[in-house]
């Protein structure tokens, strides 16, 4: 794939509806990009891809490196080539959107890929726990997610700012984090970074691949996306 194109498999509403059995493999996604996020088969934890390395952050077994045949029922990846890269700090979750949009004026209705490398005073994350049965909906999974608060940790967060019109994604900022020692991470809820680097790029080219499974096609999706706010 060309640099700074977004490849997405499945839609956010499908994940919220528990469609988590089929999807591309790690090996397949590696051909589409080198940075990204997603979840594993049966929603078993959070996926983050940094510089071509894919990590599975699980609620109960920590961070795992999976083989190339592991399946991801939802993923967003890009070959990340930042147009803007600058030292920044302090930075927190509330200021991030403005900081990113300042980098890319006239991009309100486009996607923006975001990478943050830095030292975090605090970063809170959640980690989804594996489905107890096939099709278990997101509303049930949210209730039993693991929430963690990491303090004084260096690491990398990667994700996307999706525009409001993009209901197939998760409108707003959605990022996943992994610590520099690759021991902890998850879906970013909130953070306070003391000092670091903010890199970003506008994305106007999106390739959306939809599941062809009967589970996907037998589900009725509403017009609006249920947004899982980071
Ligand atoms: Zn997430």
Image (cartoon, rainbow, N blue to C red):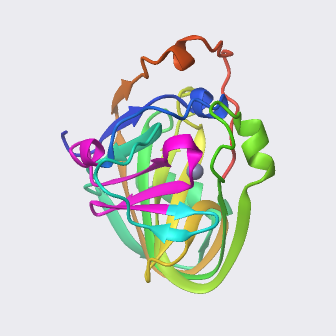
- Image height check: is 75 above or below 224? below
Does residue 187 appear left or right of residue 146 in this picture? Answer: left
Image coordinates for residue 71, horizontal then vertical, percent = 40, 43
Image coordinates for residue 144, horizontal then vertical, percent = 78, 53
Q: Quadrant of residue 90?
A: bottom right
What range is drawn magenta here? 27-56
Residue 114 shows in this picture:
yes
Name the residue: 37% across, 25% down: 209
- Observer-nearest of 198 and 226: 226
Q: Is residue 66 magenta?
A: no
Residue 106 shows in this picture:
no
Outermost residue to the bottom? 152
Does residue 187 appear left or right of residue 83 in this picture? Answer: right
- Image height check: is 46 above or below 166? below
- Image height check: is 101 above or below 12? below
Does residue 124 appear left or right of residue 88 in this picture? Answer: right
Image coordinates for residue 118, horizontal then vertical, percent = 47, 79
Name the residue: 73% across, 45% down: 141
- Observer-nearest of 229 and 16: 16
- Observer-nearest of 34 and 132: 132
Q: Quadrant of residue 215?
A: top right
- Observer-nearest of 161 and 133: 133
Name the residue: 70% across, 38% down: 138
């Amino acid at each position: 794939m060309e640099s700074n194109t977004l490849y997405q498999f499945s839609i956010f509403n499908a994940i919220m509806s528990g469609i988590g059995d089929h999807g591309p493999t790690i090996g397949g996604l590696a051909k589409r990009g080198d940075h990204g996020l997603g979840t594993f088969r049966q929603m078993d934890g959070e996926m983050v891809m940094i510089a071509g390395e894919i990590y599975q952050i699980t609620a109960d077994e920590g961070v795992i490196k999976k083989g190339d045949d592991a399946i991801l029922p939802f993923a967003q990846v890009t070959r990340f080539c930042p147009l803007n890269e600058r030292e920044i700090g302090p930075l927190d979750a509330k200021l991030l959107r403005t900081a990113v949009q300042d980098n890319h004026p006239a991009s309100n209705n486009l996607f923006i890929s975001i990478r943050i490398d830095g030292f975090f005073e605090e970063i809170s994350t959640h980690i989804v726990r594996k489905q107890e049965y096939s099709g278990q909906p997101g509303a049930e999974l949210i209730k039993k997610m693991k929430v963690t608060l990491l303090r004084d940790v260096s690491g990398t967060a990667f994700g996307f700012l999706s525009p409001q019109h993009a209901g197939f994604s998760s409108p707003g900022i959605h990022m996943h984090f992994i610590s520099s020692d690759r021991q902890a991470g998850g879906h970013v809820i909130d953070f306070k970074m003391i000092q670091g680097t903010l890199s970003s790029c506008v994305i106007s080219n999106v390739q959306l691949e939809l599941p062809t499974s009967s589970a996907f096609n037998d589900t009725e999706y509403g017009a609006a996306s249920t947004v899982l706010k980071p």
